[in-house]
Image (tube, rainbow, N blue to C red):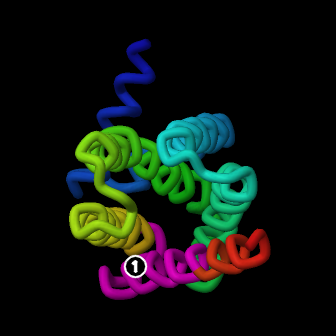
Amino acid sequence: MAKVQQFLRIFLDIVLWRRGPQDLPASGLLVLLTLAAYVAVSVAQLALLHEPPSAWWFFLVGDPLLLMAWVWLALKLFGHVERYPQAVSAVLGTGALLGLVLYLPLQLIVTVSGQGPASALAQTFGLLLIVVFALVTGRIIKLATDTNLFTGIAVALTYFLIINTLLGVVRGVES
């Protein structure tokens, strides 16, 4: 239990910009555990949103695999593939943490208030989540690639654009 708390503190510190992926061990087990946490939080999000089966497959399989491949590609392009276990653990772990403490509570507020996904409240929360994702993931990429924050945010937002484009394709096919 003490190890779990230690890692939760590290992920929180990464979100708060006090630490970075270099503060995590280069561990395949940690990658698997953060992937499991990321998927578990996605299950809670999907259940809350009552998404169709195609969205479940997309977010439980496609999103994590694409995210992990995107991190690897960024590290490969900048010549730091050896940092992959730490960087991908940081991205998945902070994604799970943010999903649990930020996304789910905001989604509950929207749902309880009777607002739909197209409401101003939901759109404002959505923009807030994009900004937080871009800043946190962008900083992780910046630190892992030894580049600058602009580059890290550009990599994060490019991933966000690709994943949402693919989601649009998946939803278009099911219509």
Q: Viewed as shown, does residue 77 lie left or right of 49?
A: right
Along the line of sight, which residue is nearer the eye, 154 or 50?
50
Q: Is residue 165 magenta?
A: no
Magenta stretch: give its range: 143-164
Amino acid marked by disc 1: Gly
Along the line of sight, which residue is nearer the eye, 115 or 38?
115
Q: Measuring 62% from the left and 37% from the top, which residue is drawn there?
A: 36
**Magenta stretch prevailing secondary structure:** helix
**Residue closest to the far right:** 173
- Residue 158's place in the image compared with 65, above or below, is below
Q: Measuring 61% from the left and 65% from the top, which residue is drawn there?
A: 67
Along the line of sight, which residue is nearer the eye, 169 or 159?
169
Position in image of residue 127 (x %, y %): 28, 71
Position in image of residue 2 (x %, y %): 39, 15
Q: Measuring 43% from the left and 23% from the top, which residue is drawn there?
A: 4
Image quarter of the C terminus: bottom right
Image quarter of the N terminus: top left
Position in image of residue 97 (x %, y %): 39, 42
Q: Secondary structure at mark 1?
A: helix
Q: Residues within 10 Å of mark 1 (few under 14, many from 20)?
A: many
Q: Is residue 160 magenta?
A: yes
Position in image of residue 123 (x %, y %): 29, 69
Q: Is residue 135 visible?
A: no
Which residue was labeled with disc 1?
Answer: 152
